[in-house]
Amino acid sequence: MIEIKRRAAALGFAATGVARLDPNPHAAELDRWLADGHAGTMTYLHRQAEQRKDPRLVMPGAKTAIVTLTNYFHGDRNPNPEPRVPRVAQYAWSSDYHEVLGKRLEQLAAAIRELIPAATTRCYIDAGPVPERELAQLAGLGWIGKNMMLIHPEIGSFTFIGVILTDADLEPDLPFEADRCGTCRRCLDACPTQAFVGPRDLDARACISYLTIEHRGEFTATQSEQVGDWVFGCDVCQDVCPWNVSFAGATHDPELAPHPQRRPERQGCVSESLRLNVSEGKPRGSFRSPFQGPVYSGNSSSVGRRSGIQGSRIRVGSLARRRCGRRRCLNLWSLIRLPARFNLSAQQRAVLDRQSVR
């Protein structure tokens, strides 16, 4: 096990632990949370419930989980001090973590199979019916805070959780039993939408991350006001956490360095560059959105309904007019992969131009 952790550290993982696969100790809480409707339109969570309650069902024959943490904090808790500048959660500032960490997990899985030749493995990075936070806690990597984020006592909560399931019978680490949140409720009180029904009980339907990524359809006036300047995700409950204030340090991982257009000083300009690209009719294959990857992918006609562009492969978290410098821009923050041969008509370009005026 020491060698596996050494290999993990060499690959860039900030922390690694091992958990035995047992029924999820939070299974009853998951059932109650789903029954209360707090998952909103994320129906996949209902479909995956049995596997999340018993991760042994995810991979038949699996006995243990190797859990990794990767720091993605970029050292800026107030990325948009200028009012009315669009804000983006820090995890989306860098390259698609599914690809970056997926490759590393596969390398670590290969190392496990090398050290234990008879072992089989399966990797997960924020995908599939795996209860990552619960497994991380059981692997001794931290506790689940009142904001429902895993908090590592030395690096905070700005981390990606990776999981390798294996049938290898590895010695598990001691679970992290302590709740170090104590009486603190800064995350609960700071939530702009008061989405927390109570400690460790989030109504996703009111969460800014849900509203700007998972929500479909137009915002109500209340939702628009609550979302404010966030256009993709939200970091508020992490920004105020004392464990992050005290211990979160900026990542030095070159593969997770912020993309130039996603840096704080550039976030207000991304939507304008996108508008110009669309309105100038540049070939679809020549433009690559600053936000890409599985979390953004998929077909959605929501933009088409609003802009007159039908059949385009566009998915947005939030489609709302925001003040961007001296322009009012249409923020299509998570536009990805329009077909290379997709051509906008003059009428369609005019629609976008009218929606982004001086």
Image (tube, helix red, strand yellow):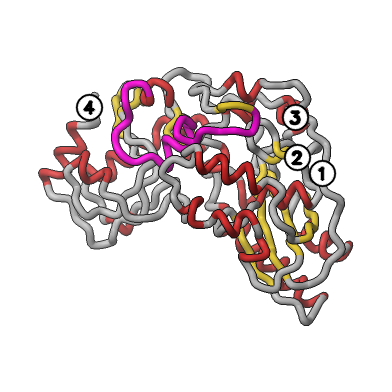
Task: Please provide the residue range marked out in magenta.
Answer: 199-222
Looking at the picture, which amino acid does disc 4 mark? Val
Q: Which of the marked residues, 1 or 4, is nearer the chain's N terminus? A: 1
Look at 89% across and 62% down and name the residue there: 2
Looking at the picture, which amino acid does disc 1 mark? Phe
Q: Which of the marked residues, 2 or 3, is nearer the chain's N terminus? A: 2
Looking at the picture, which amino acid does disc 2 mark? Trp
User: Which residue is situated farthest in the left direction here?
Assistant: 347
**Is 4 situated left or right of 316 in this image?**
right
Q: Which residue is mark 1?
A: 176
- Looking at this view, is 272 or 115 the one in front? 115
Q: Which residue is mark 4?
A: 357
Asked whether the residues under the numbered discs 1 and 2 touch, taking CB atoms below 8 Å apart as contact, a structural biologist would say yes
Secondary structure of the residue carrying numbered label 3: helix
Q: Which of the marked residues, 4 or 2, is nearer the chain's N terminus? A: 2
Single out the mark in the foreground, 1 or 4: 1
Looking at the picture, which amino acid does disc 3 mark? Trp
Q: Which residue is mark 3?
A: 243
Q: Residue 142 lies in what quarter of the image?
A: top right
Asked whether the residues under the numbered discs 3 and 4 touch, taking CB atoms below 8 Å apart as contact, a structural biologist would say no
